[in-house]
Amino acid sequence: MEDFDEFVRARGDALLRYGFVLAGNAEDAADLVQEALARLGDAWPRVRKKHDPEGYVRTTMVRLHIRSWRRRRREDLVAAVPERGEPDRYGDADLWAELQELPRKQRAVLVLRYYEDLSDKEIAEILGVSRGTVRSQAARALDKLRIKRVLQEAR
């Protein structure tokens, strides 16, 4: 079990950043990481011997994220909207704000394609959808981002 503790110490911050990109906030990112690591801990002897443990955790995080999206299919409602959001510790704040506006599945496809550099086939396997769905979700997401940029530049 010492190997598992070393893995968590070595890759924990990177997994938290990945969770933040997927979920859009630090709390949900921490929940994704915690749940995925709990599942990895249970499967550690098997996963350590067969393949990359980090890949297992990242795939688990994406699946958990999509599962929660499927359950809710709506954004979380809050009692009060904060005046200013939390500073973006993990990258370009403008890009993150634009990604936040995308539906969860489209956001997950873009994260897996451009952040994880996965192929359409790999993304389809992770999300449990066809390659055509991956391509259409990516195209829709990129179209939304382009339209938003054009409108902003026109102002």
Image (cartoon, grey):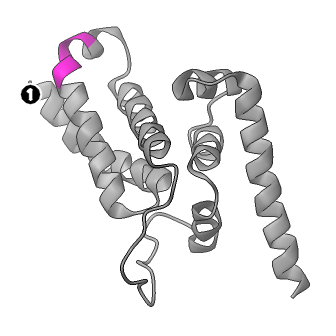
For image coordinates 43% across by 63% down, the residue present is: 76
Residue type beneath disc 1: Glu
For image coordinates 65% across by 39% down, the residue present is: 113
149 relative position to 109: left or right: right
120 relative position to 23: left or right: right
Q: Which residue is mark 1?
A: 2
Secondary structure under tag 1 reads helix
In the image, 155 versus 10, the foreground residue is 155
Residue 86 placement: quadrant: bottom left
For image coordinates 15% across by 26% down, the residue present is: 3
On the image, the x and y values in percent for residue 129 come to 62, 25
- Is residue 43 rendered magenta in the image? yes
Residue 10 seen from this side: yes
72 relative position to 28: left or right: right
Residue 7 seen from this side: no
Is residue 25 placed above or below 53 in the rendered structure? below
- Is residue 52 rendered magenta in the image? no
Magenta-highlighted residues:
42-46
120 relative position to 48: left or right: right
